[in-house]
Image: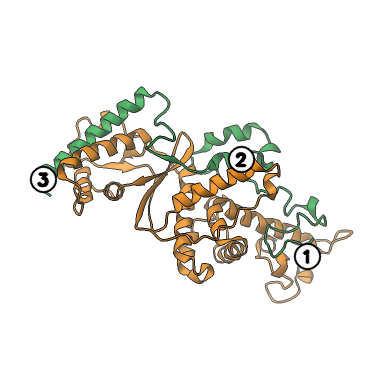
Chain colours: A green, B orange
């Protein structure tokens, strides 16, 4: 590819970048139309990992709302507040001997209790 | 004590009955833990030993639901146990627990035979979602910072939370389909979430031509986006530190796209990527 074509493409890229920045500003706080042709939403992973689970409800309802605050800072996930196991009682003293909580959801273990 | 609690479980998900030196765990733990009224020392420690391992297994299952659905329960849990035995948690956060799973699957295809390649693609796709979920975000690129830049030499970076994947299975469609099925099942049932195990999907994930995907986030929601091969190549070049001009030229080197259309495409791509917030300073 000759140099002028390379530069032409780079100029096109920069003009797109400017156009995108202007467009994003005109949308205000919404940088992109979610669900538009630009992008396809995956699972509501952030919601699913939080709502209705013991780790959130047991501590503070606001810990769910605050989930998004820690995104992008690398140290959010797995610290407990929003990522409890699906079965809150699993492995805890309170369930010992009750049967239903004593094993992981493994098929081999089902029916043991 | 730490070693006793974090040891892999033995058969039947019980604490190992032998201590590290081959002697009885019961005897060894009696030196560290008093018996309770009803439990021997090893039984008391076993509560925490099991809690620790079930927590790790839960965490892995939570980060790889599509892989779990694809493999089925038994194979997924067997895989998870083998993986955790090989790569135990070494971080303060469970966020990093599944980081090596794609590589582990590549190294041990026998664990997921005959679904090895599809399983690797699914694991990569789901790990990319972990990265997109809470990966580092750099300040977005300010066009004013490029006002005086030379188009031939300027370099542009890609946000660390954006993962570019080239997969050989339509994992994106698979995950979306799975989510739709889950929503349908949730809507059709009053059962609690706890009783809803992921549906086992026995349909093989058929191979497809190479599919370029970007997994990213917008307004704190996860998304994926299919990319044209040229766009994916361009982004990879930018991430690798190439100049904008070089990245653009390499992207179209083997392309059949009409040269007259290339500029328009590049302009559209950069406009979209800027709006999505993918670009940052190199």
**Residue, far bottom:** B22
Front in this rendered view, residue B4 or B118: B118
Establish whether labels 1 and 3 are both on one chain.
no
Residue A104: x and y, percent? 69, 58
Q: Specify whether B101 is left or right of A32.
A: right
Label 1, on which residue? B42
**Which of the labelled discs sits on residue A50, or is there none?**
2
Snapshot quadrant of residue A19 = top left
Residue at 44% from the left image edge and 58% from the top image edge: B121
- In this rendering, position of residue B23 left or right of residue B6: right
| Residue occupying the far right of the picture | B37
Q: Quadrant of the C terminus of chain B?
A: top left
**Cα–Cα gap, marks 1 and 2:** 34 Å
Q: Identify the residue shown where x is 39% and y is 30%.
A: A31
The numbered mark at residue B128 is none
Q: Position of residue B28 (x, y in %)?
A: 76, 70
Mark 3 — residue?
A3
């Amino acid at each position: 590819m000759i140099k002028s074509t390379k530069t032409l493409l780079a100029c096109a890229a920069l003009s797109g970048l400017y156009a995108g920045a202007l467009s994003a500003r005109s949308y205000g706080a919404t940088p992109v139309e979610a669900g538009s042709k630009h992008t396809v939403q995956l699972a509501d992973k952030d919601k699913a990992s939080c709502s209705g689970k013991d780790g959130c409800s047991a501590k503070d309802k606001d810990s769910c709302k605050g989930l998004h605050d820690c995104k992008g800072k690398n140290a959010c996930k797995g610290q407990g507040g929003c990522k409890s196991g699906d079965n809150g009682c699993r492995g805890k003293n309170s369930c010992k001997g009750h049967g239903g909580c004593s094993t992981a959801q493994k098929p081999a273990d089902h029916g043991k209790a | 004590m730490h070693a006793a609690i974090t040891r892999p479980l033995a058969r039947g998900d019980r604490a190992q009955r032998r201590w590290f030196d081959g002697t009885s765990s019961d005897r060894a733990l009696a030196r560290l833990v008093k018996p309770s009224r009803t439990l021997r020392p090893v039984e008391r420690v076993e509560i925490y030993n099991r809690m620790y391992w079930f927590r790790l297994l839960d965490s892995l299952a939570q980060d790889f639901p599509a892989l779990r659905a694809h493999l089925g329960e038994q194979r997924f849990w067997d895989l998870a146990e083998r993986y955790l035995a090989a790569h135990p948690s070494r971080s303060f956060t469970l966020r990093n627990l599944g980081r090596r799973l794609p590589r582990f699957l590549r190294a041990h295809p026998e664990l997921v035979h005959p679904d090895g390649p599809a399983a690797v693609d699914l694991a990569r796709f789901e790990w990319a979602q972990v990265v997109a979920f809470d990966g580092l975000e750099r300040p977005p690129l300010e066009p004013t910072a490029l006002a005086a830049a030379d188009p031939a030499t300027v370099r542009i970076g890609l946000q660390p939370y954006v993962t570019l994947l080239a997969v050989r299975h339509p994992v994106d469609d698979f995950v979306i389909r799975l989510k739709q099925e889950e929503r349908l099942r949730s809507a059709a049932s009053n059962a609690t979430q706890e009783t809803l195990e992921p549906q086992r999907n026995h349909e093989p994930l058929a191979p497809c031509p190479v599919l370029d995907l970007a997994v990213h986030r917008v307004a704190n929601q996860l998304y994926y986006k299919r990319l044209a091969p040229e766009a994916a190549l361009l982004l990879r070049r930018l991430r690798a530190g190439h100049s904008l001009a070089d990245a653009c030229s390499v992207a179209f080197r083997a392309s059949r796209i009409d040269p007259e259309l290339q500029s328009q495409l590049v302009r559209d791509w950069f406009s979209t990527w800027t709006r999505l917030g993918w670009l940052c300073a190199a």
